[in-house]
């Protein structure tokens, strides 16, 4: 078992994300396949259209985000989450002119 306290974690730059502050709470030095981070997006922040070979889950802690794929769009608010399958294309936009904080879970195969 490993406890990660609220003050623990390392800041990092999330690839293809902008105007976001991200802190890895669980990373490959602790877990073989899973990364867990807390990302706070500023009102003009988000993520460019891209895909990844890892599974991703974005859980909205506060604020609102829109996640768009090739042919669909999902608006998420506090308490909502979205699962993004490996290889699935997505982009993220922040809604409402207020920051949005998400818990991000990334699982590599």
Image (cartoon, rainbow, N blue to C red):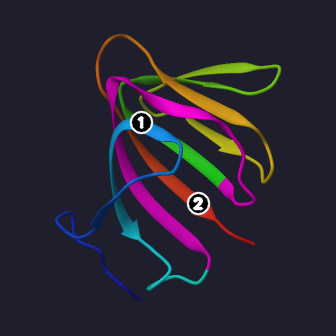
Return the residue found at the far left. Answer: 7
Number of other residues with Cα within 10 Å of mark 1, as a class: few under 14, some 14 to 19, many 20 or more: some
Asked if 40 appears above or below 95 in the picture, the reply is below
Most foreground residue, 18 or 74: 18
Q: Residue at x 64, y 65 (%)?
A: 107
Residue 50's x, y, as percent? 68, 40
Q: Which quarter of the figure is the C terminus placed in?
A: bottom right
Mark 1 or 2: the one toward you: 1
Asked whether the viewer can see residue 80, the reply is no
- Check disc 1 and report the residue beneath it: 18
- Residue depicted at 43% across the width and 15% down the height: 95
Task: Specify start and end residues of the magenta stretch as a single range.
Answer: 33-55
Whether residue 44 appears in magenta in the rendering, the answer is yes
What SS does tag 1 mark? strand
Q: Which residue is at the front of the view, 19 or 34?
A: 19
Per the image, the residue denoted by label 2 is 106
Q: Secondary structure at mark 2?
A: strand
- Tag shown at residue 43: none
On the image, the x and y values in percent for residue 92 come to: 55, 29
Question: Which residue does the image show at 37% across and 46% down from the upper left?
Answer: 39
Real-space Cα separation, disc 1 to disc 2, in angstroms: 18 Å
State the image coordinates of residue 63 (x, y, percent, origin top left).
36, 25
Q: Main secondary structure of the magenta part?
A: strand
Q: Residues within 10 Å of mark 2 (few under 14, many from 20)?
A: many
């Amino acid at each position: 078992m490993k406890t990660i306290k609220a003050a623990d974690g390392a800041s990092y730059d999330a690839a293809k994300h902008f105007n976001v502050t991200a802190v890895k709470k669980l990373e490959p030095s602790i877990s073989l396949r899973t990364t867990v981070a807390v990302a706070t997006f500023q009102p003009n922040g988000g993520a460019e259209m891209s895909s990844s070979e890892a599974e991703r889950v974005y859980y909205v802690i506060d604020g609102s985000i829109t996640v768009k794929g090739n042919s669909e769009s999902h608006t998420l608010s506090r308490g909502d989450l979205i699962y993004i399958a490996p290889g699935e294309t997505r982009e993220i936009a922040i809604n409402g002119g207020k920051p949005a904080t998400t818990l991000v879970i990334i699982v590599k195969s």
